[in-house]
Amino acid sequence: MKQMMIGLMAGWLLALPSAVMAGDFTVTTTDDAGGTTCTASVCSLRAAIAASNETSDSDTITLADAGTIELNAPLPAISGELTILGPGADELLIEGSSAFELTDGSLTITDVYLSGEGPLITARAGSVTLAGLSIDARSGAAIALDEGATLL
């Protein structure tokens, strides 16, 4: 009976969609493609954030390529615990207006260069941690914090 229960539990866990488990996503393209699917061969920043929002735990997005990610629109709002690791502020530029929005949870962004119309980062709630960033908000504030949000 015990072996049968273990087998049933293992089968149930395998049947769960991957969205309920924490994820590490590697962005493999600087294209600003939509969708929520990240594969080992193709994963955009937009898709990685959308996929991260589907998990129930903290996630890490690694930006593997140097170059420029030119955003077509603001990225999906972030509503969990997310760390975005860039290759270096002198290596990767994320270009776009109102790029990041945190609605709840925590957002850590390291080692990228953000440029565009401000605010480039908006926190409605939760905490934002920034390290190794270069920010160029051509107009408006670089970072906007609503009451209850913190910048660390």
Image (cartoon, rainbow, N blue to C red):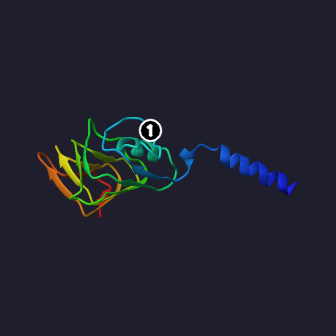
The answer to whether residue 36 is left or right of residue 20 is left
Give the residue furthest to the right.
1
Task: State the residue lying farthest toward the front.
Answer: 41
Nearest the viewer among 91 and 96 is 91
Mark 1, other Cα within 10 Å: few <14 / some 14–19 / many ≥20 = some
For the point 45% across and 43% down, the residue is 38
Residue drawn at (47%, 56%) of the image:
58
Helix or strand or loop: what does disc 1 sit on?
loop
111 over 104 or under it: above or below: below
Write down the residue under mark 1. Answer: 36
Q: Residue at x 34, y 44 (%)?
A: 29
Query: Which of the 4 image quadrants contains residue 44?
Result: top left
Q: Is residue 14 above or below residue 128?
A: above
Q: In this view, does 12 lie to the left or right of 23?
A: right
Quarter holding residue 110: bottom left
Residue 23, image x, y percentages: 49, 52
The three-letter amino acid code for the residue at tag 1 is Thr
